[in-house]
Amino acid sequence: MKLNLITFASSLASRESIFTDHHELLDAINEKYDVQYIFPEELDKPLPEGATMVLAGSGGVEEMVKANIDRLPPYVVLIADGLKNSLAASLEILSWMRQNDRHGRVLHGPTGFIMQGIGDYVAAHDAIAKLQGRRIGVIGKPSGWLIASNVDYAAMRERWGVEMVDVPLDEVVKGYEAVAADEVQDIADEFISKAAGVKEPSRDEVVKAMRLYRSVKALVERYRLDAFTLNCFDLIPTTRTTGCVALALLNQEGIPAGCEGDEQTLLTMLAVQAATGEMTFMANPSKILDNAAHEMVLAHCTIAPAMTDRYIVRDHYESLSGVAVEGIFDPMDMTVVKCGGASMERYFISKAHLIECTTNPNMCRTQLHLRLDEPLDYFLERSIGNHHVIVRGDHKQRLESVLRMLGATPTT
């Protein structure tokens, strides 16, 4: 893996002494990465491709970094092993950057800790590269109740490198009407046969849900969408079915698919997929069970079957119609995350442990009873909208690296 190290050192330090004085850290870095060292006099050229970080080779480099700040990456990671006053200089630089609305961090600690941080940064850089040029569909206008979940399309193009594409909802309806029932009999039967059970829906209802799935999938292909959010509620009166299965199956196929036209949550799902390669679950915070123990339930009616340990075919909770998915998990570690704001400028992340899947009849069908590491005051005092994203496993550190590099800051 390639790694570019922009190396700053005081005029009192020779170039050779940089490699001698910091040999323990640099030996570890060189062993793992194909390193290209870049010195200040070379910064008049474009930076090479690949992850790029700043190595503080000594103290006394503050003015040098300040003078070159516009030639550095947008998110500046300062590596400091503490030798030759490198940490002191890095802290001064970080403070100046914060005063001037530049994002970054100091990476300091034992060699193993620094190497872990470099690994997270390189992985985050690769994840962000995957976002460039992605086409993000907004199929139908966002649901009326989502009054804080839209994004600025121009800001998303500039900050994330993605293109937001509006798609009329009536194209879904036309596509649905054009799909004959006999075209989807096989996939309807397969969906039913793989389920742990079927409760409310009839087979005919599952067939209708699969017709909608085919319609939405065709639209994704026609508009070359890499991810999309669907105003699913507005489809119910015209199609007399729900979009839960369509979203579930497309998520399973690697196309992040969100509900209700929620743009911020969809982009969070896309970032999580790029960073982890995992499927995600978009859910409502539904009930806090124990504030002191940080226990709550998050629930929604659609989830990729392959993300679950098993699933039950249900009807949609709010409308008591169509087809939904009740996902069931065994206890495991998870991560809860949300990035939001018109420019996706704020984020929340917490490690969590799934205690059980509940079956409250007054909540959406897939219900996760989680114990979060972070206090639940966040949800009640500074929540980033309604929907949040859940992914299997502990990905907190990597997701923080990605979201920080995209210009977001944690909620405070």
Image: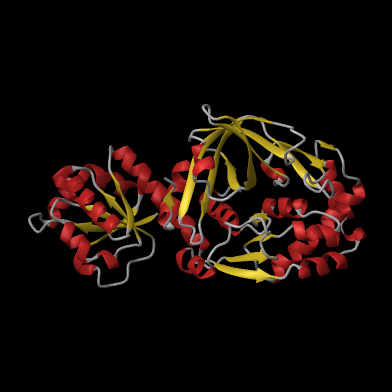
User: Is 28 placed above or below 214 here?
Assistant: above
Position of residue 254 measured from the top left corner of the image (x, y, whole percent): 65, 54
Q: How many marks?
A: 0
In the visual, does 145 lie left or right of 104?
Answer: right
380 and 394: which is toward the camera:
380
User: Is 2 placed above or below 301 here?
Assistant: below
**Quick one: quadrant of the N terminus?**
bottom left
Position of residue 56 measured from the top left corner of the image (x, y, whole percent): 21, 52
Residue 300 in sight in this render:
yes
**To which quarter of the image does residue 74 belong?**
bottom left
Residue 123 in sight in this render:
no
User: Is 239 placed above or below 86 here?
Assistant: below
Position of residue 33 measured from the top left corner of the image (x, y, whole percent): 35, 51
In the visual, does 112 lie left or right of 390?
Answer: left
Q: Residue at x 70, y 47 (%)?
A: 304
Given the current orientation, which residue lies at the most extreme left position?
A: 12
28 and 219: which is toward the camera:
219
199 and 51: which is toward the camera:
199
Q: How is colour applied across the structure in the image?
A: secondary structure
Q: Residue at x 59, y 43 (%)?
A: 390
**Quick one: quadrant of the C terminus?**
top left
In the visual, does 219 lie left or right of 163?
Answer: right
Position of residue 98 measured from the top left corner of the image (x, y, whole percent): 29, 55
